[in-house]
């Protein structure tokens, strides 16, 4: 019998929700691999996401991201963290299909503290608070629609969020 490889969980959410941090900690707790599509794209392309935005533009980045997300969700078996904007792509929504998808929810107060809005995120380079709030308002319905679980991370430690996800995954398996 051939068993299809599926991620244990795919993490989605806005910048600063903790996808990379919680993803790595969750994978360590579960003893599985962690795969971050942003990091994979940077490693494939040999440059930062900011550089891709500057040199090739956002549509070029989104095309790379669509391909990498489809590959990762189809081939990885551990925890997969997506880039913040990835779920907005219709092709990616289809790829997420019936996977276990965890939306890490957060508000502007915690996101601002965590991200520091230091200019390293291209979509938040100018007027970061307003840009983040606009992104989140536009994206929230999609994050909620693609997710099988929503976890509010506001004011909670990484360990607490990870424990909550582990419990939810156990309850739904
Ligand atoms: N629950 C939390 N409590 C406190 N700090 C957190 C929490 N989750 C993440 N952080 C911190 O917030 C910062 C941003 O987190 P992280 O890079 O994981 O977010 P992200 O969702 O991957 O963002 P991006 O979409 O830009 O990749 C990191 O410095 C991380 O240590
Ligand atoms: O929110 C977004 O659209 C992005 C978030 C990051 O994870 C990166 O994927 C990139 O900076 C775009
Ligand atoms: Mg990240």
Image (tube, rainbow, N blue to C red):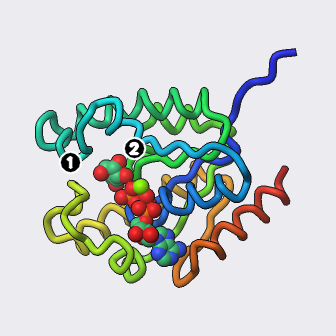
Give the mark nearest the N terminus, 2 or 1. Answer: 2
Answer left or right for 61 relative to 164. Answer: left
Please say if 81 is above or below 94.
below
Residue to which mark 2 is pinned: 39
Q: Which residue occupies the foreground of this view, 44 or 63?
A: 44
Specify whether tag 1 is near ligand 2 (CB below 8 Å): yes
Please say if 156 is above or below 6.
below
Q: Which residue occupies the foreground of this view, 108 or 78?
A: 78
| Furthest-right residue in this view | 1
Please say if 156 is above or below 147.
below
> Dot 1 lies on which element?
helix
Residue to which mark 1 is pinned: 50
- Spatial CA distance of label 2 from label 1 is 12 Å
Answer left or right for 166 relative to 65. Answer: right
Residue found at x 52% / y 68%? 105
| Furthest-top residue in this view | 1
User: So how many labels did they put on this image?
Assistant: 2
Answer left or right for 148 relative to 145. Answer: right
Question: In the rendering, at what x and y percent does residue 157 appear?
Answer: 57, 79
Instruction: Give the quadrant of residue 40.
Output: top left
């Amino acid at each position: 019998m051939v068993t299809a490889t599926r991620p244990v969980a795919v993490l989605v959410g806005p910048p600063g929700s903790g996808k990379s941090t919680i993803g790595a900690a969750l994978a360590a707790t579960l003893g599985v691999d962690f795969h971050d599509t942003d990091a994979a794209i940077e490693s494939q392309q040999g440059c930062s996401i900011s550089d891709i935005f500057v040199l090739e533009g956002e549509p070029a980045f989104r095309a790379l991201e669509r391909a990498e997300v489809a590959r990762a969700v189809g081939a990885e078996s551990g925890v997969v963290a997506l880039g913040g904007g990835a779920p907005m792509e219709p092709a990616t929504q289809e790829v997420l299909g019936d996977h276990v998808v965890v939306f890490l929810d957060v508000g502007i107060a915690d996101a601002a503290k965590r991200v520091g809005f230091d200019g390293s995120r291209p979509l938040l380079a100018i007027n970061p608070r307003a840009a983040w709030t606009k992104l989140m308002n536009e994206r929230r319905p999609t994050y909620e629609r693609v997710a099988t679980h929503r976890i509010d991370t506001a004011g909670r430690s990484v360990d607490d969020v990870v424990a909550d996800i582990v419990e939810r995954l156990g309850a739904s398996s």
